[in-house]
Image (cartoon, rainbow, N blue to C red):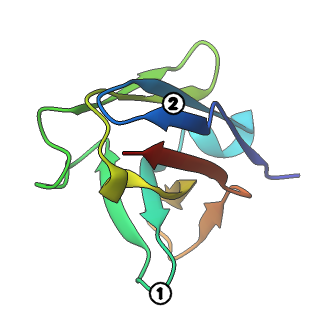
Amino acid sequence: QVQLVESGGGLVQAGGSLKLSCVASASIFADSVMAWYRQSPGKRREMIAGNLAVANSVRGRFIFSEDRTKNTIYLQMNNLKPEDTAVYFCNAAEIGSRREYWGQGTQVTVSS
């Protein structure tokens, strides 16, 4: 069974840091491009950081990393701003197919 499980969200003051984790099933991790997305209320879900790209809105503040021995990706978020408040999702896009998988999401709230 394919699973993506995020953790690490929470409430933080502006300027603070959080680190998100996403553990993926071994069956997909090796064959997928991994990325973090986020979605704020009333807005479209947007890709923010992954194997292939980092969004301009978070470049220099957010760092994507992965540990393939643990089938895990991370998102280190520094200098958080209130506009970073969103539900953050882990995504796995299977290479060579149109299949993709999503985690359940983890809430990040940044207070001003």
- Residue 72 is situated, as x and y percent measured from the top left of the image, at 59, 26
In the displayed orientation, state which residue is furthest to the top: 69
| Left or right for 73, reference 33 | right
Tell me: residue 57, above or below residue 8. below
The residue nearer to you, when weighing 83 against 48, is: 83
Q: Which residue is mark 2?
A: 73
Q: Characterize the local packing of mark 2: few (<14), some (14-19) or many (20 or more) Cα atoms within 10 angstroms.
A: many
Residue at the bottom extreme, as displayed: 42
Nearer to me, 75 or 23: 75
Q: Residue at x 41, y 83 (%)?
A: 43
Residue 95 visible in the snapshot: no
Q: Is residue 34 left or right of residue 49?
A: right
The outermost residue toward the front is 112
Q: Where residue 53 appears, x then y in whole percent?
A: 20, 49
Q: Secondary structure at mark 2?
A: strand
Q: Which residue is located at x 67 percent, y 55 percent?
A: 105
Q: Residue at x 47, y 71 (%)?
A: 40
* Residue type indicated by callout 1: Gly
Q: Indicate the quadrant where residue 112 lies.
A: top left
Q: Residues within 10 Å of mark 1 (few under 14, many from 20)?
A: few
Residue that carries the numbered disc 1 in the rendered image: 42
Q: Of helix, strand and loop, which one carries label 1?
A: loop
Question: Which amino acid type is shown beneath numbered disc 2?
Answer: Ile
Q: CA distance from mark 1 to mark 2?
A: 27 Å
Which percent across, then down, holds residue 67? 50, 17
Q: Position of residue 34 (x, y in %)?
A: 45, 46
Classify 6 as above or below 74: below
**Foreground pick, 85 / 76:** 85
